[in-house]
Amino acid sequence: MAAENNVKRPKEINTRPFKDLLAAAKKMRDEKKLNLDGVIELTVEADRAPDGKLTNAKVSDKRGDKTLERVALEFIAALSDSGVLDFLEGTTHLKVTVRLDSSNVEVVAATEVDSEDRARQLERTFGGMIVLGRIVKRGQDEEVYYNHTQVSSKEKEVSVKFSMPRAEMGAMLSKYASEK
């Protein structure tokens, strides 16, 4: 599927940067240094190097605890270090929007490609990879992430959206934080 659509097949994702970040954020929250109550919205933009690494990350919009800016930039570093963006070949900029309210957690990562046809091609390929990921990771923690992820395209933009009930996400975060 990936080869026939000229999409780099993703390698195994390194989840350690995310687990480390979650443990650090939980510690900050427990020490009352991070407030995750209420509605939180923030947007981070970064350049993407050919090797998939993110550089020049900046918070471009933020609503919520001022400490979130640092956590958001650490999230972008974890995203970069995880290898999860390796398959976005040919893209040079990424916009990540996070919205957290009393009932849901939503993260949308969007990037622009060179044509509408390419955007639709990537949408189909990424969508197929997500379905395959659900099958391969069935019964494992990672299955939940695939079950809550959708891919879409509009004009030349490709977006990957992760949306999960806040309570379910909280339970997973607590589990990961205790694994550290």
Image (cartoon, rainbow, N blue to C red):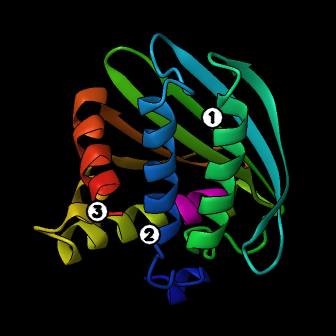
- What residue did someone put label 2 on? 15
How packed mark 1 is, by other alpha carbons closer than 10 Å (few <14, some 14-19, many 20 or more), is many
> Would residue 120 be counted in the magenta stretch?
yes
Of the numbered discs in the image, which one, if any, rests on residue 88? none
Residue drawn at x 66%, y 27% is: 42
Query: What is the x, y in percent for residue 22?
Result: 45, 50
Amino acid residing under circle 3: Glu
On the rendered image, what quadrant is the C terminus found in? bottom left
Q: Earlier in the sequence, mark 1 or mark 3?
A: 1
Q: Give the dominant element type of the magenta stretch: helix, strand or loop.
A: helix
Q: Going by the image, does 167 lie left or right of 6?
A: left
- What residue did someone put label 1 on? 97
Foreground pick, 29 / 51: 29
Residue drawn at x 45%, y 14% is: 37
Query: What is the x, y in percent for residue 79?
Result: 60, 60
Q: Earlier in the sequence, mark 1 or mark 2?
A: 2
Task: Report the mark closest to the observer, 1 or 2.
Answer: 2
Foreground pick, 51 / 152: 51
